[in-house]
Image: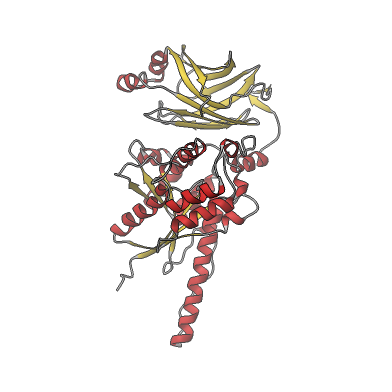
Amino acid sequence: MESPSVTSVVLLACGSFNPITNMHLRLFELARDHLEDTGQYKVVSGLISPVGDGYKKKGLIEASHRREMARLATENSDWITVDSWESLQPEWVETVAVIRHHNEKLLETQQNCDEMDTVKYTKKRRIENRYEASSHQKRRDGPKVMLLCGADVLESFGVPNLWKQEDIDEIVGGYGLVCITRTGNDPHKFINKSDVLWKHRRNIHLVHEWVTNDISATHMRRALRRRQSVRYLLPDAVVSYIQQNDLYSAESEQKNADVVLAPLQRYLEASSNCIHTHISGGIKEINKMPTSLCGTWDTISNVNFEGYMIALGISPCLRKIALKLKLRKVIEQQGDQFIIKTLSPLKSYTLSFRVGQELEEFTQGLDNRHIKSLVTWEGNKLVCEQSGEKKNRGWTHWIEDNKLHLELYCEGEVCKQVFKKNVSE
């Protein structure tokens, strides 16, 4: 007989699943093993909820295909199923709303079971049917919904304007998070740097993946559009479905390329449309989008990077490692909204910002400081002024001779980097 102190859990994974991979399925198995090993939880089911077409992510194929591939991938599982509610919504639905939807369904199911018990045993049990999501009230005797994700989702909580802070608070504090980590990730450090995650740290279950698996949907799409084999990386039924429907091509990868991602678009709509910003008590006009910086860029030169790192106070050991790394920039530019990813084998950093709007930034993986950043256009250059512990700090991006130039400066030290566009990406 199951102990009354054991909590029943439904694991919910939200995402693009574009396409679903064997790694997506492994997340469920790893999470179940970890939770049940604690002796406090019993995982009763797993739900895959593909995002709807309204998410507008670049390369996102139709929800009907992604939903069917997920169904095929789970048809032999006795506990993981696919739910279509989110993918059928005409507009993008925030993750917290998806979790609420499934929690309410569980409450309704539990209430119906209780009512049947009342008729069968002629005795009535007390039913707590008042529920308010914002107060984080949950039934103690019913299943608990937990969001299942990878470390990339946990770190995306720190991307400005991508998540509402109140949504993070509700997801982690009210429901719970099971995060599958990998070698190279440091989720404990990320949680420690975030006040809202630290507050709910006991509701975050970190599961380390000891058997390294670097399968990603992005890599799968690249292989598929190049007509390379993906067998044993995706379920066989999914591979067959992709081939039968001729999914994933160079054309499909460009879908939504010029459209703002739904969470950012919603943020922009809620923000002021004013193109002026207050700077040092005055007004500075913002000149919008003189050139496009978007694309994947690889380093071809990096001058005085060590001097810049010394100015930031980075340790000699880390400087020595960083100087050997080849950096890659991936820039997404949609209107005056930017996402700039700096990628390296050691650490990656993502910055999301809107031109002319100040943001609070945490330079994780660099010098790990809290700063305020403001990005503006000055002619054809994208200029960032950063204020914080270090003086005269910032950077400038621009295109010249079909190359991406970046100047990083801090306390008199200037690092000049040049990147060449990677046409194969």
Q: Quadrant of residue 8?
A: bottom left
Q: Position of residue 376 (x, y in %)?
A: 62, 23
Asked if residue 232 is positioned above or below residue 326 in the image, the reply reads below
Nearer to us in this view, 144 or 184: 184
Asked if residue 152 is positioned above or below residue 3 in the image, the reply reads above
The reply to whether residue 190 is visible in this rendering is yes
Q: Is residue 171 left or right of residue 186?
A: right
Q: How is the image coloured?
A: secondary structure
Q: Position of residue 55 (x, y in %)?
A: 60, 45
Asked if residue 274 is positioned above or below residue 418 in the image, the reply reads below
Q: Position of residue 316 (x, y in %)?
A: 31, 19
Nearer to us in this view, 203 or 20: 20
Q: Going 32% across and 45% down the picture, which residue do you hit? A: 208
Q: Going 41% across and 20% down the picture, which residue do you hit? A: 312
Nearer to us in this view, 119 or 128: 119
Q: Going 48% across and 72% down the picture, which residue do you hit? A: 110
Q: Is residue 412 left or right of residue 97?
A: left
Instruction: Classify the position of the N terminus by image quarter.
Output: bottom left
Asked if residue 224 is positioned above or below residue 357 in the image, the reply reads below
- Work out which residue is located at the far bottom of the displayed protein and give it: 122
